[in-house]
Amino acid sequence: MRLDVLSIFPDYLAPLRLSLIGKAQAAGTIRLSVHDLRDYTHDRHRTVDDTPYGGGAGMVMRPEPWGEAFDDLLSTADGDPRPLVIVPSPAGIRFNQQLARELAIEPWLVFACGRYEGIDQRVFDHTATVARVIPVSLGDYVLNGGEVAAMAMIEAIARLIPGVVGNPESLTEESHEDGLLEYPVYTKPSTWRGLAVPEILLSGNHAKIDRWRRDESLRRTARQRPDLLQELPATELDKADLAI
Ligand code: SAM
């Protein structure tokens, strides 16, 4: 997968060189490039923002550097498929595991990280004539810029690409993969500070362990995220589920 990130703070994205995402880049599974939006300015101060038309607080990102950056990026397409442009924004559609799965099969994603009060709307109206553009929100709160949101999305998306996470089975057993939160997990020692690991996990009875995990998963979801249980289609529940 090709990934491009546009930002006025390219150093923000440095942690993506670490751990599994860093290894995936070294292995060529993902090709990540971070571009400095200020490279597309032409004045001495490398200006990217200006006051909002209509008045109001804060500054808005000017369209020209963004337009040039997109022209430059898209001209590198060379018969590649057109990219999907993701605009991190609190006004976007909510990012979740389902969307991460859909994005993980895209060949090329571009993240346009805004700052200040956001990016002049015409950038997206124009870019939408040559690429698909979707605003995506990390959640119902406001960050200072799109970089942290882009990083979170890239990590969630990239780990679903085959080969990025060593053991693919660990992906299917995670929270949100089956619409539920994951059951509690334990490791050695079997007793720590007077707290024992649930007996069933030491039993070696895998059918019973699976049932216990499923019950814990349902209980935790009911307690912490009842909204997820309500969204779960009835076909995803078995008779034993309905008994708890
Ligand atoms: N004025 C904008 C609004 O109310 O929708 C918020 C601008 S915010 C201070 C600056 C930038 O941070 C946004 O352009 C966006 O790139 C990013 N951002 C802030 N909150 C976000 C969120 N919840 N999800 C994704 N990106 C976010």
Image (cartoon, rainbow, N blue to C red):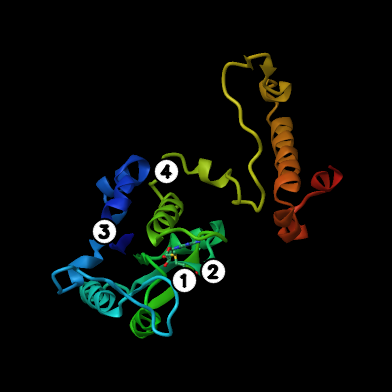
The residue indicated by pointer 1 is 135
The residue indicated by pointer 4 is 165
Indicate the quadrant where residue 1 lies.
Answer: bottom left
* Residue 46 seen from this side: yes
The residue indicated by pointer 3 is 34
Q: What residue type is labelled 4?
A: Val
Residue 30 placement (x, y as % from top left): 31, 54
Compare marks 3 and 4 and give the one earlier in the sequence. Answer: 3
Q: Is mark 3 on a helix, strand or loop?
A: strand
Q: In this view, does 163 lie to the left or right of 215?
A: left
Nearer the observer, 211 or 216 = 216
The residue indicated by pointer 2 is 93
Compare marks 1 and 3 and give the one earlier in the sequence. Answer: 3
Residue at x-position 34% and y-position 84%: 126
Callout 4 touching callout 1 (CB < 8 Å): no
Disc number placed over residue 27 in the picture, else none:
none
Residue 101 placement (x, y as % from top left): 50, 59
Callout 2 touching callout 1 (CB < 8 Å): yes
Compare marks 3 and 2 and give the one earlier in the sequence. Answer: 3
Indicate the quadrant where residue 198 lies.
Answer: top right
Q: In this view, does 68 lie to the left or right of 61?
A: left
Report, in whole angstroms, how far the alpha carbon at label 2 lies from the one at label 1.
6 Å
Report, in whole angstroms, how far the alpha carbon at label 3 lies from the one at label 2.
24 Å
Q: What residue type is labelled 3?
A: Val
Report, in whole angstroms, how far the alpha carbon at label 1 lies from the one at label 3.
19 Å
